[in-house]
């Protein structure tokens, strides 16, 4: 089976072409990506292509049809989502299948979006399969999943599969909106997470607030005092290993930027921690390259000490002292 990677805009353009030419080869499309909510929003945008009467080449976004879609109120677009029990129930599938027999109200097609299709249980899956085998000609199905490996081959063989990756700009924009962070921070966390939007969101939700404190502490504070502050924080907030690993990774990324800044003689194109650019440039000027390199290696090796469950005070003392030694030397 061939998998293709698409940016959302490419996929929308592809569907617009197919719709204009009336050359719909499949009725079932499986959209795969790491963010389930995001996939549903993409599926809605594709659905608009089949509904908006003013394609040019994409939906106009302004007509009454487009507006209904944006408000999730279009009668021919149905979204099935897992219930609180995190499954799509037999009842949901049964209702959907009954509905496939109805003609569309306003559009040429009825469109069904099934979010996290892997959450269907066997009985529901069998019922869905029967419908996908011989879909009514006025129906189109979009299935979404975060894990294509969890999808049965019988579903895969009836679907055209699209693997989606967020466009960097889209992702950055989404992070800015959802978390009220600056463009520099959104860009930074997205790069830090290897362009995995879910990992970026997770970081913003959990550990990002400590990052700023940590990086500020790198430049101007008494290491023992900073260590005490983090020691207290880690016990009050009950830092997990995952939290501490994130913090170490922020430090490694920051000092790696300092190193890059030294090697590239101030070229900032590759700098990840853009929101700390002035500090990075100042440290690049001030610190010895050799010591910065050692510090990056130290942060990358830190997770190894953590498995020995060292005394927290010792851990934080060591971390901030190492940093202090580099920033205070010439
Ligand atoms: Zn429209």
Image (spheres, rainbow, N blue to C red):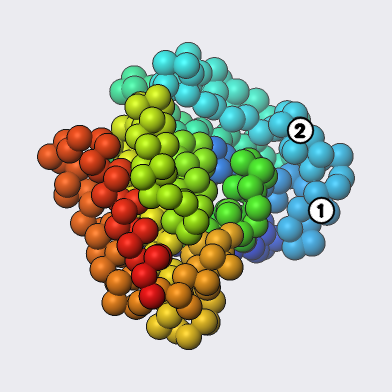
Q: Secondary structure at mark 1?
A: loop
Residue 189 percent location from the top left of the image:
50, 53
Residue drawn at (86%, 47%) of the image: 62
State the CA–CA distance, disc 1 to disc 2. Answer: 15 Å
Residue 45 percent location from the top left of the image:
66, 47
* Residue under pointer 1: 60
- Quadrant in which residue 234 is drawn: top left
207 and 326: which is toward the camera: 326
249 and 288: which is toward the camera: 288
Residue drawn at (42%, 21%) of the image: 86
Badge number at residue 71: 2
Q: Is mark 1 within 8 Å of ligand 1?
A: yes
- Quadrant in which residue 260 is drawn: bottom left
| Crowding near the residue tagged with mark 2, few <14, some 14–19, many ≥20 C-alpha atoms within 10 Å | few
- Quadrant in which residue 98 is drawn: top right
In the picture shown, does residue 82 fall above or below 292?
Answer: above
How many tags in the picture?
2
In the picture shown, does residue 255 fall above or below 146?
Answer: below
Badge number at residue 247: none
In the picture shown, does residue 128 fall above or below 310?
Answer: above
Choose the circle earlier in sequence order: 1 or 2.
1
267 and 298: which is toward the camera: 298
Q: Position of 27 compared to 324: left or right?
A: right
Q: Position of 187 compared to 244: left or right?
A: right
223 and 73: which is toward the camera: 223
Q: Evaluate whether residue 86 shows in this view.
A: yes
Q: Mark 2 and mark 1 in contact (Cβ < 8 Å)? A: no
Residue drawn at (35%, 27%) of the image: 235
Which of the image's four quarters has the C terminus?
A: bottom left
Instruction: Kindly report which numbered mark, 1 or 2, lies closer to the viewer in this rendering.
Output: 2
Which of the image's four quarters has the N terminus?
A: bottom left
């Amino acid at each position: 089976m061939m998998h293709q990677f698409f940016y959302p805009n490419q996929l929308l353009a592809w569907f617009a072409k197919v719709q204009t030419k009336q050359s719909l080869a499949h009725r079932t499309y499986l959209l795969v990506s790491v963010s389930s909510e995001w996939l549903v929003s993409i599926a809605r945008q594709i659905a608009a292509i089949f509904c908006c009467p003013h394609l040019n080449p994409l939906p106009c976004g302004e007509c009454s049809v487009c507006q209904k879609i944006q408000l999730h109120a279009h009668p021919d677009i149905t979204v099935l989502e897992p219930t609180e029990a995190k499954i799509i129930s037999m009842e949901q599938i049964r209702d959907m299948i009954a509905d496939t027999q109805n003609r569309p109200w306003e559009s040429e097609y009825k469109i069904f979006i099934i979010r996290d299709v892997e959450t269907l249980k066997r009985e529901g899956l069998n019922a869905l399969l029967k419908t996908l085998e011989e879909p009514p000609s006025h129906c189109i199905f979009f299935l979404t999943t975060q894990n294509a490996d969890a999808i049965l081959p019988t579903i895969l063989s009836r679907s055209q599969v699209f693997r989606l990756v967020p466009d960097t700009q889209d992702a950055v924009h989404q992070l800015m909106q959802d978390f009220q962070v600056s463009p520099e921070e959104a860009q930074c966390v997205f790069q830090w997470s290897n362009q995995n939007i879910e990992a970026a969101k997770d970081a913003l939700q959990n550990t990002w607030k400590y990052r700023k404190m940590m990086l500020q502490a790198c430049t101007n504070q008494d290491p023992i005092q900073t260590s005490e502050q983090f020691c207290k924080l880690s016990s009050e907030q009950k830092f997990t290993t995952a939290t501490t690993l994130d913090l170490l990774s922020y430090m490694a990324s920051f000092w790696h930027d300092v190193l890059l800044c030294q090697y590239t003689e101030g070229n900032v194109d590759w700098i990840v921690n853009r929101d700390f650019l002035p500090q990075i440039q100042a440290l690049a000027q001030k610190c010895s390259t050799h010591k910065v390199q050692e510090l990056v290696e130290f942060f990358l090796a830190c997770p190894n000490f953590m498995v020995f469950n060292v005394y927290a005070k010792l851990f934080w003392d060591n971390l901030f002292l190492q940093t202090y030694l580099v920033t205070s030397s010439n």
